[in-house]
Image: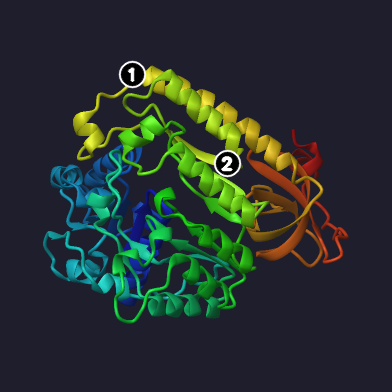
């Protein structure tokens, strides 16, 4: 069997894709990257906003046309599969296999059934499962928990992924060991709310550490770089910032979604904290990590948001000075309290506010990135950039960075680089040795292309 998985959505979905792919390979399947040669196409879906749902709907229509011409097994997994909205879509387009986020280990049973198979249960064995390490990768994801016990009024995740369940620390460390053996140098700990890790277990016998202590354990494992995403401000503690400062392997990057700068809007979102609470968390982070890179998520145009509320979001952005942000116009999702009880704002209002927020984000990102010019940063280089004479990667603070290839450095790895130029969304650097001396660059094979992308030529 030739199998292809198309993935939409978050890093958790990417992790789940790897988990299912490893299962398919163990059954003898070949993983392919073209629908034209696939016998089985599985869509790993996202339901957090309307756009990825529409992409799934469109692709399912295309796959149904292909199946009219030749045999093809069509599958859906992930958050959309868990919802009635996705199940209606599956019935309409004749999906053969439907797996919710809690039933991913049923993929073998589903393929063996030779008939329509729907698995939507949340199975405990998923939390104990340790997938094999990805081959040939320097960075990898590691899920430490699934589900969420918060009930933000706009969010469908508690419905699609169920209540919070923390993985046992022994399973986490066992999976981490396999990643290190495979050569992984950067691990991102994943969860819908990572800093609530262990809270669901209470005083369970066997002991679950707090998230801060889990960070310390992971940081002492020998892994070179550790990141985590995502955090809920309600569960963020100063001890997390302290653990990051004490543990050199933990990168000084904090993604802490605020969603709105207005306490009134946060209350309508049921976020369980105020603007002032959030600012106290930022102060705690900067107390222990003065140079921390701060990223956030912001929803613009939530039902009932006034211009005054939006101005509070802009002023919060200025007060914190975020390095980067993921920004979205509110997207009503069927099944959420905000969809049932609140009236949506006009599309043009949401769009106009989003444009203003993006402009503010660009100003701050340009300012923050410009401050890095002249500094030495540790880069994890992933491979070739668009131009073959350059490599691309990211800093410990998650800044996308491009460097010219240098003598002795022509592929992936961790290296030092001096930032030469920065734009709001990209840094351009030169590889250096431990003393800060520039490494000699390789001759450019394509002088015209190199001139177009050389660091100091960028605007």
Q: Crowding at label 1, few (<14), some or many (≥20) Cα neighbours within 10 Å?
A: few
Q: Earlier in the sequence, mark 1 or mark 2?
A: 2
Q: Nearer the viewer, residue 110 or 435?
A: 435
Give x and y (percent) for residue 354: 47, 26
Q: Specify whether residue 207 is in view.
A: yes
Q: Crowding at label 2, few (<14), some or many (≥20) Cα neighbours within 10 Å?
A: many
Kindly identify the residue that appears in the image at 24 percent across and 67 percent down. 107
Q: What kind of colouring is applied to the model shown?
A: rainbow
Give x and y (percent) for residue 344: 29, 24
Q: CA distance from mark 1 to mark 2?
A: 27 Å
Task: Give the residue pinned by disc 2.
Answer: 324
Give x and y (percent) for residue 81: 22, 51
**What is the quadrant of the N terminus in the image?**
bottom left
Q: Nearer the viewer, residue 452 or 342?
A: 342
> Which dot marks residue 79?
none
Q: Quadrant of residue 191?
A: bottom left
Q: Quadrant of residue 72?
A: bottom left
Q: Are marks 1 and 2 in contact (CB under 8 Å)?
A: no
Task: Give the residue pinned by disc 1.
Answer: 346
Kindly identify the residue that appears in the image at 51 percent across and 24 percent down. 355
**What is the quadrant of the C terminus in the image?**
top right
**Looking at the image, residue 73 lies above or below residue 58:** below
Count all numbered tags in the image, as a single digit: 2
């Amino acid at each position: 069997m030739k199998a292809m998985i198309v993935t939409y959505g978050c890093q958790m979905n990417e992790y789940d894709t790897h988990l299912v792919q490893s299962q398919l390979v163990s059954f003898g399947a070949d993983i392919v990257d073209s629908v034209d040669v696939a016998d089985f196409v599985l869509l790993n879906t996202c339901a957090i906003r309307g756009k990825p749902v529409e992409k799934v709907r469109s692709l399912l229509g295309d796959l149904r046309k292909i199946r009219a011409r030749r045999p093809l097994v069509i599958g859906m997994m992930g958050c959309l599969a868990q919802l009635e909205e996705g199940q209606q879509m599956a019935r309409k387009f004749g999906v053969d296999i439907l797996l919710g986020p809690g039933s991913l280990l049923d993929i073998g049973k589903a393929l063996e059934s030779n008939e329509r198979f729907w698995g939507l249960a949340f199975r405990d064995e998923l939390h104990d499962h340790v997938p094999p390490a990805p081959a040939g990768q320097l960075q990898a994801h590691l899920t430490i928990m699934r589900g969420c016990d918060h009930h933000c009024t706009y969010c469908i995740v508690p419905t699609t992924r169920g209540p919070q369940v923390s993985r046992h620390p022994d399973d986490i460390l066992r999976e981490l060991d396999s990643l290190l053996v495979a050569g992984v140098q950067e691990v991102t700990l994943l969860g819908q709310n990572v800093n609530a890790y262990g809270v669901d277990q209470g005083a369970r016998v066997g002991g679950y550490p707090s998230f801060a202590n889990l960070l310390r354990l992971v940081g002492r494992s020998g892994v070179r770089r550790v990141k985590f995403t995502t955090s809920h401000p309600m569960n963020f503690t100063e001890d997390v910032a302290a653990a990051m400062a004490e543990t050199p392997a933990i990168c000084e990057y904090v993604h802490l979604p605020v969603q709105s700068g207005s306490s009134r809007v946060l209350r309508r979102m049921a976020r369980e904290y105020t603007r002032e609470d959030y600012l106290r968390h930022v102060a705690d982070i900067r107390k222990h990590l003065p140079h921390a890179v701060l990223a956030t998520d912001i929803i613009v145009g939530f039902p009932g948001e006034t211009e005054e509320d939006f101005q509070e979001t802009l002023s919060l952005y200025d007060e914190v000075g975020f390095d980067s942000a993921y920004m979205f116009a509110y997207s009503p999702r069927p099944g959420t309290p905000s969809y049932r009880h609140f009236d949506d704002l006009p599309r043009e209002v949401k769009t106009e506010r989003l444009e203003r927020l993006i402009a503010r984000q660009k100003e701050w990102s340009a300012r923050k990135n410009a401050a890095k010019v002249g500094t030495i940063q540790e880069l994890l280089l992933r491979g070739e950039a668009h131009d073959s004479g350059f490599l691309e990667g990211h800093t410990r603070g998650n800044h996308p960075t491009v460097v010219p290839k240098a003598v002795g450095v022509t592929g992936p790895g961790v290296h030092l680089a001096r930032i030469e130029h920065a734009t709001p969304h990209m840094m351009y650097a030169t590889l250096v040795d431990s003393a800060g001396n520039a490494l000699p660059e390789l001759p450019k094979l394509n002088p015209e292309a190199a001139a177009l992308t050389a660091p100091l030529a960028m605007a």
